[in-house]
Image (cartoon, grey):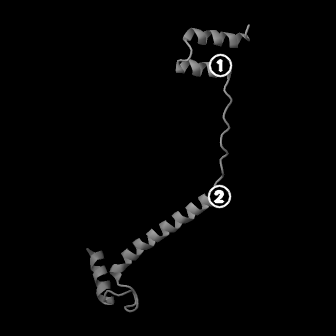
Amino acid sequence: MAGLLGLLSVLARFGGQGEWGHGGPPLWMLPIMAFLGAIFVFLFVLVVFWLVRYFYRTEIAPRKPVPETPLGVAQRRYASGEITGEEFEKIKQDLLTGGS
């Protein structure tokens, strides 16, 4: 309650004007100006962040495709249904034993 009375006395003393009673903004505008200032600072930081990220990002080289192994080809063909399980097992045995 004392804080509210103190605020009212300040407003009455300065007539709702700034701290000097002339030339300053009305006191009710200070929170609005603070809010708009915070938005401005946030947008400024966001733009600077975006610019730094845009100009200094590291280009990631495209990944080179990993060459497919013969066993990988057989697994893919078995998964797609091109070969049966028996054919897959035969190919796998051939590949693991060296083709003999």
Picture quarter with the C terminus: top right
Disc 1 element? helix
Quarter-of-image position of residue 65: top right
Alpha-carbon span between mark 2 and mark 1: 42 Å
Residue occupying the point 60% across, 13% down: 88
Residue 1: give x, y in percent of width and height: 25, 73
Figure check: 17 above or below 68? below
Which residue is under mark 1? 71
Mark 1 neighbour density, 10 Å: few (under 14) some (14–19) many (20 or more): some
Q: Residue 3 shows which numbered tag?
A: none
Q: Residue 56 shows which numbered tag?
A: 2
Quarter-of-image position of residue 98: top right
Point out the frontmost of discs 2 and 1.
Answer: 1
Disc 2 element? helix
Amino acid carrying label 1: it is Leu
Residue 89: give x, y in percent of width and height: 60, 10
Residue occupying the point 66% across, 52% down: 58
Residue occupying the point 38% across, 85% down: 25
Figure check: 70 above or below 62? above
Residue 41: give x, y in percent of width and height: 49, 69
Q: Of the residues under marks 2 and 1, which one precedes in the sequence?
A: 2
Residue occupying the point 40% across, 76% down: 33
